[in-house]
Every structure is written in structure tokens, then in C-alpha cells.
Amino acid sequence: MRKRLPFIILYAAVAIILGAASAWPVTDVAGLAHALANALFLFAGLAAFLVLLPQRFSLPVQIFIAMVAGIAVGWVLTPWDPPLVTDYLGVFGQLFVLLLKLVITPLIFVSIVCGVAGIGDVRKLGSLGAKTIGFYLMTTAAAVLIGLTCVNVVQPGAGRAHLRDQVQEDRQTQERTNLGVMLRDEALPRLIQNPIMAGQDVIAVIFFALLFGAALASIGPPAEAAIATFRGLDRALITIILWIMALAPIGVFALMAGAISELGLQYVYTLAKYCFTVFLGLGLHFCLLCLVIVPVLGRVSPMRFLRGMLPAFEVAFSTSSSSATIPVTMECASKRVGADEDICSFMLPIGATINMDGTALYVSVASLFVAQVYGVDLSIQQQLMVFLTAVMVSIGTAGIPGASIGLMAIILSSVGLPPEGVGIVIGVDRILDMTRTVVNITGDSVGTVVISRSEGRMTDPASSAAS
């Protein structure tokens, strides 16, 4: 309790300041009661999501509770005090999004450099390296195309532009300049911004990272110290992401409450439609990998593959981390499915870094969904930019829970949409993260089967066990 006392005092101070500002000017007893009620509400929210829930529930459960609570608060409190929900509570949602944007571009650069350098000199890898990279790029591109097709057919965000227009009109009519608005829209964006790569075109960053990583790989032993440094930076940036994810429950709570306040309860139906679209795309790509590529290119029974990979699927779904699943994936792909052990040891760690089929599909669907909600009709050229950006940024996605949230801000920026649009989908991200991680490791594992077969090194686990 003593360790948490300074934080509780800090939360109380923040709640009192924002609560008083939300009811300012306080001129009578009713105004004082209003300020106290708002301060107590804000303090209860901070204490619940930053102190109480982390002691009792895992992060996925915390985020689910935050999503449901945000829907309830946005629906109940908006008629009573709209600025409290959108402006003052919105400070915490804006803080969470800005912190994610703070590290995502450096993380992409460092992760791509590490991933490409870890492959080794492409000129010396021979057919195995060429087949690995070619297969991973092919399946990632197919995943993005499936995602774009699904979101264009289902149109989950269509028909919500009028709600956004109404929100903008309300904000212009009210012309609120309270403390919450100033913190949310002016102070925090100025304070929390990337001092290293601010304003850089992400495509240029990715291109340079690919070249730089390839150059380090081609140098050989003299570049080992530099590669080790980048791997240390990669771990440091991932650690920062994990710290930021501790704020995910309060961030999701605030963003969901604000979305319901501005867009109404109809938005829940829109989110359900969006989730269906993502699940549809992931399901189609999963079927392509397991029911088409495995039997046709890998010449392995889909039932044998699915049965063999089931333990890895369970770990991937529960952890939402393709990196944490690598040991189980290796065991399943080699011992239970029959892929060559050396090929698994080579391909799976690389795949966990540069091959993110589910993530690439997800961010492409999410980006077009946000565009539909904002009433922006993306042209073929803009959707091609989404395709290219999704394929490239998926190479630099860390294999940890929630790492793809910041990628959406980059893709949105590439087609002229506000990065804050990630707040529209962030409430259900964790649910979708668990599913897309399964697709991520499936793409990696299918690659080991296909390449093992092409190299003539595929085995039958049943016959090996019998002997």
C-alpha cells in the first residue's frame, strides 16, 4: 500500500484539478457539488483502471471491462455532462494514443533493421533465403488483398459519416475552450511527440531501414556490434510499448466513452460489423493457408497440419504474441507436422519479425473502416497506398500484444486521414489481436511446410514415431 500511495495522491490531484475545471466557474453550492461529483468520478476511474483491476485481472480482461464500462459511461453521462465525457475524460484517451505514436516509427525502423540484418547476407543465403522471403511477401500481399476486398464488400463503416459531420458541427457551435480541450488538443500533442523522426514519411523510413539492414547483413562480422546495438534498441522500444499498454484500460475506457458520446449507441452495431469484417478476412486467409497452400504446395493433409499445430494456436490466441509462441510453433511444425527442424529454426524467428499476415490484413481493414466512418471515399490509388504501406509496416511489427495499434496511425496518415482515427477501433483491438496472432503464426508455419517440401526435407511424424 505504501508503494502505491504516491500514485493514489497523484490520481487524486489530477481528478480534483480536472473535476474543478469541468464545473468552473463554481459560484454556488450546486456548482461545488458538480465539481466534487466529477472529481470523484475521475478519481474512481483512475483508481479502478490503474490500481484495482491490474491486481485482479489479466490485461485482455481489463480491456474488455474498460470497453463495456466506456459504452455505459458514454451513454449515461453524455446527457448530463457532455464536456466531462468528451473533453476531460478524453484527455486520457488522447494521452494513450499519443504515447503509442511516440515510439511506433522508431520501433518500425529498428525492427526492420534487425529483421533484415538477422536474415543474413541475401547473396549467401541461396535458394532457401530467396524462397523464404518470396513466400512471406506473397502470403502477406494476399492477406492485404483479402482484407481490402472484405472491407470494400461489407462496408462496415458506411453510413456513419453524417454522425461525424454532426460531431464537427456541435464542436464548432459550442466553441469550447476549457482546460480539457486545451490539454487534449494543444498541450499534450506539443509535449508528446517523437523528437527523432517527427514528420518523416514512413515509406521513406521503411525503405531506408530495408537498405540499412541489408547493408549490415552484407558486411558480416564487422557489423555484429552495430546489429547487437539495434537489437538492444529494439528490446528497449518494445519495453516502452509494454509500459504504455499498462495504460490501455483507461485509454480504451476514455476513447470508447467519447465515441459513444459523439456517435451514439448505433456505434456499437458499427463496431460489431467491423469485427465481423475482420473475422471474415482472417477466416478466409486462414482457409487459403490451410486448405489450399498446405495441400497444394506442401502436399500435407490439412487435417494433419491443423491437428499438429493446435497447441501453437492455443498459445498464440491466449498470449496475442507471435514472438512468445515461437518455441511452441517450432515444436509443433517440426515434431507434429513434419517440417524440417533446421528450416523451422531458420524461418520461424524470421517469420515472427517480418511475416505478419494477420496484422497486415487487420490494419488494412481498420484503415478503410476509419475512412468510411469519416465519410472519405478512398480512390484506387489511395487503396494501393494502403496496400503497400500495410505490407511494409507489417515487416516492422513487434510480435507483442497491441503493437499494431500504432501502425494504423501511420497508414491513416499515408492516405490523409487523421491519426486520431485509431480511437474509433481501439476499443475492440485486443479481441481481434488474439485472432490475428493465430493467423500470423499460421502463415509462418505453412511457410516451413512449403519450403521443407520444396527442399525435399519433409518427413512423416507418424512413421518417425513408429520407427
Image (spheres, grey):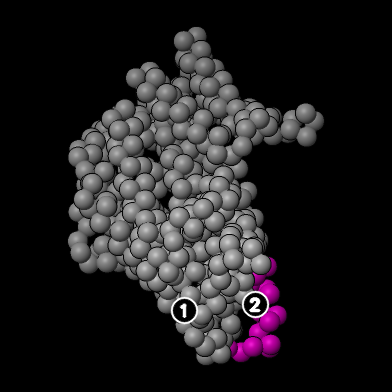
Q: Residue 344 carries which label?
A: none
Q: What amino acid is at disc 1? A: Ser
Q: Residue 227 carries which label?
A: 2
Quadrant in the picture for residue 417: bottom left
**For residue 223: magenta?**
yes
Which of the image's four quarters has the N terminus? Answer: top right
Disc 1: CA contacts within 10 A as few (<14), some (14-19) or many (>=20): some
Q: Which residue shows up at 69% across the image and 87% down it?
A: 221
Residue beneath label 1, please? 454
Q: What amino acid is at disc 2? A: Ile
Q: Between disc 2 and disc 1, whose residue precedes?
A: 2
- Compare residues 269 and 23 and report the one nearer the observer: 269
Q: Nearer the viewer, mark 2 or mark 1?
A: 1
- Compare residues 96 and 400 and report the one nearer the observer: 400
Q: How many labels does the image show?
A: 2
Where is residue 292 drawn, in percent x and y? Answer: 35, 63
Where is residue 14 drawn, in percent x and y? Answer: 59, 32
Q: Which residue shows up at 42% across the image and 69% down it?
A: 299
Q: How far apart are marks 2 and 1 (CA)?
A: 31 Å
Q: Which residue lies furthest to the front in this view?
A: 467
- Compare residues 159 and 348 and report the one nearer the observer: 348
* In the image, residue 395 above or below residue 248: below
| Residue range highlighted in magenta | 218-233
Q: What element carries label 2?
A: helix
Q: Which residue shows up at 30% across the image and 48% down it?
A: 369
Which of the image's four quarters has the C terminus? Answer: bottom right
Q: Is mark 1 on a helix, strand or loop?
A: helix
Q: Which residue shows up at 26% across the image and 43% down it?
A: 156
